[in-house]
Image (cartoon, rainbow, N blue to C red):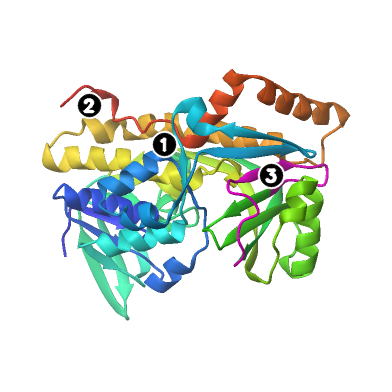
Amino acid sequence: MRTQVVIVGAGPAGLMLGRLLELAGVDATILERKSADYVLSRIRAGVLEQGSVDLLERAGAAGRMHAEGLVHHGVHLSFDGDSHRLDLTQLVGRSVMVYGQTEVTRDLMAVRNGTTIYEADDVTLHDLDGKPFVTYRKDGVDHRIDCDFIAGCDGYHGVSRASVPASAVTTYERVYPFGWLGILVDKPPVAEELIYAHHQRGFALCSQRSLTRSRYYVQVPLDEKVENWSDDRFWDELRSRLAPETADALKTGASIEKSIAPLRSFVAEPLRFGQLFLAGDAAHIVPPTGAKGLNLAMSDVAILADALIEAAVEKSDAGIDQYSSHVLQRIWKAERFSWWMTSLLHTFPESDAFSRRIQRADFDYLVSSQAAQQSLAENYTGLPIAGLPHRQGRG
């Protein structure tokens, strides 16, 4: 079998890349080691930047999002019970869309016309510096796909980055000493917009998936076990970290999903190795505080799609040659914002009295400064997904 691009990973990044290539007439085959049902069972983030909304429209996969998603024009920040709302639309003229990653994945699956091979075992990448090909096993039978390019969209633990010699990759990582204990509950959200709360007991987030389904988180130590948390214990802890009026309005119920996610910042450099290109979680991880993970993956593949289309259709390597350096600039800006939000809103075991007062001063400055609020709003709603430098200004 031969195709122009093999995409490893059928999460939202891989599916979006496949769809953008398909619309440009570039043949792409997606390999996924899990089943389609398993991919759709993953519970992930649900806040889309304007750039991600625009990409779903470009992909022809935005209909259900616009019908069922929730447009949020603001966000609430709370520090030890003192609350402030940022009007995102007023500050920067943009909003965000609350729409679950699972639904994004489902919509991209629905519009895909190309070949997607699920339950592909033993995926192996070959000859990255020459004429690349990928082998895999399906139902006990070995297969080979020859291609021009490989896109690694298979996540932090995937085979793509692991296929590159360790000496060729520089990684940057910060592991935070806490995680987020999150639950999903079929109850109306406590507020119309998201609430990010700092409390001396730890961070809390009131999020949502719809008008009838809510997602809540509390900061817990990194070694905490989810089985130690009954629903009642979770609700009591969440209430203790919220402003009294918010805690009183909270509607509780039996959790339908409960898990702990560790927090880390991670970047790999470079993102191109011969004819292999990394994107999404294979290239970077951000703590979820700034809602950047899915959105950063979307911007990666938007830029990568343009580069691969240029290489396949226009027979120019200019875009793929610039892909790594160009996309890393945006990645590091998202890493900075996510690190800053995490530093502002969480409690750190090593923090002394001075550090805690600096956190408070940071919050007070944010509340008092329109410029600071605009900076947060600009980053939270998403920096522009700029085209490759050499293509800017072209019709």
* Region of the chain picked out in magenta, as a range: 186-204
Residue position for label 2: 391
Judged from the image, the secondary structure of the residue bearing numbered disc 2 is helix
Q: Is residue 193 magenta?
A: yes
Q: Which of marks 3 and 2 is nearer the N terminus?
A: 3
Judged from the image, the secondary structure of the residue bearing numbered disc 3 is strand
Q: Which of 258 and 54 is in front in this view?
A: 54
Judged from the image, the secondary structure of the residue bearing numbered disc 1 is loop
Q: Which of marks 1 and 3 is nearer the N terminus?
A: 3
Mark 2, other Cα within 10 Å: few <14 / some 14–19 / many ≥20: some
On-image quarter of the N terminus: bottom left
Residue contact at pointers 1 and 3, CB within 8 angstroms: no
State whether residue 271 appears in this view.
no
Amino acid type of the residue tagged 3 in the rendering: Tyr
State whether residue 382 appears in this view.
yes
Residue position for label 3: 176
